[in-house]
Amino acid sequence: MRPRDLSEFAGQEHILGPGKLLRRAIETDRFKSLILFGPPGVGKTALAHLIADRSKARFVELNAVTAGVADIRRVTQEAAALRNNNGRTILFIDEIHRFTRVQQDALLPDVEQGTVTLIGASTQNPFFSIIPALSSRSQIFEFKPLGSDDISKLLLRALTDKERGLGNIPVTLIPEALDRIVTMAQGDARRALNALEIGVLSTPPQPDGTILYDLTVAQESIQKKGLVYDEDEHYDTISAFIKSLRGSDPDAALYWMAKMIVAGEDPLFIARRMIIAASEDVGTADSRALVIATAAYQAVERIGMPEGRIVLAHAAAYIAAAPKSNAAYLGIQKAMQDIEEEPLLPVPNHLKDAHYKSAGRLGRGKGYKYPHDFPGHYTAQQYLPQKREYYQPTEQGEEKKIQERLAGLQKKFSGGET
């Protein structure tokens, strides 16, 4: 059911819609090297073959799983000979992220010199998996999972196409079954078409000779939702999780956490990220968040999964719902910046270590006021030789009380009260 032309191509309107750059390049057969990346079953290989059908160039296909440096050299040598006769070669490499650095380096000179026009298809972000020298010489296009309407149209087209599809078989597709396949395919056209095919070909016909493709058949044909979770998806999902915690959206936080758990993410990795969020994003607005996050890490470490998911959810819900402040985070960032960029401040004598014998002869600790000896366990005292402000509590949660207390102490300090 590969598309025979752009009018049959499903999805990817953001790069293949009318007037879009990639569509214009294909229609005019004028394009430079391309890297197409996105999840499986969204049309990367289909588009490469569509380009092959339209282009006047010689089209050579390699799979990075089975091809080696020798295969690359053979193709590029043939391409160089063809180029001397004013011919062009398009080299399509499927799963290009599987190429080692050595293999990618071997390909680079011929791409750079224009001996071959490269089309690489990858399920991984090329900025992670392709050497910079190669990716920088290619136009990069991201493919998205297909929408529900696109998957539905593909399935219905396959049912009616007598040449390439199942059009010669009388099939009654129940709407609920269609919806089930579309939902479980998760934007993967190949997965959806496979589920349709296996269901039709394995279901005994009715007395009238028709195949009844109902919800039961659909559930058997596509039992579990496909979940792509490669390196790129790992980073994107944990980023969404952390930002949902920070944004006080417990529902979103639990959703992204569930995705990570189902995908097999290390639960201790999730717990570590929540410990960081508890201090970076909640901070002193609710210091219990750090206690809960740390306890969650320890609990998951002890009890493991699947029960650990409950503990992780407990911590995520609490952190997401907690008042937020990054005052402590900003404070340490500013203090470290001053340490690195500004002249170091000397430790005042009255704050220096005075526990050893004869420290007094050097003036160590002289004039230090022990705060617990004073009413309210506070006394005016200079702790930095120069005035600096790092921690600026907000009015969120417990920080409002902290702000009020520090303001009161600052008033005493400024007024010289003891």
Image (cartoon, grey):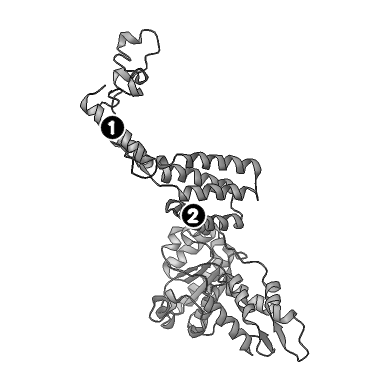
The single residue placed furthest to the left in the displayed view is 415
| Residue 265, horizontal then vertical, whole percent | 59, 52
Q: Which label belongs to residue 79? A: none
Pointer 2 residue: 250
Above or below — where is 88 with respect to 172? Answer: above
Q: Residues within 10 Å of mark 1 (few under 14, many from 20)?
A: few
Residue shown at the point (29%, 24%) measured from the top left: 346
Q: Amino acid at mark 2?
A: Pro
| Residue 384, horizontal then vertical, whole percent | 28, 27
Q: Where the N terminus falls, by quadrant? A: bottom right
Pointer 1 residue: 408
Residue shown at the point (43%, 83%) measured from the top left: 27
The answer to which of 384 and 41 lies nearer the viewer is 384
Q: On the image, which quarter does residue 208 sit in?
A: bottom right
For residue 269, say whether it is visible: yes
Q: Amino acid at mark 1?
A: Gly
Report the Cα–Cα distance between label 1 and label 2: 35 Å
The answer to which of 302 and 9 lies nearer the viewer is 302
Q: Where the C terminus falls, by quadrant? A: top left
Q: Are marks 1 and 2 in contact (CB under 8 Å)?
A: no
Residue 43 as seen in the image, left or right of residue 14: right
Between disc 1 and disc 2, whose residue precedes? 2
Residue 197 as seen in the image, left or right of residue 130: right
Q: On the image, which quarter does residue 337 sit in?
A: top left
Callout 2: helix, strand or loop? helix
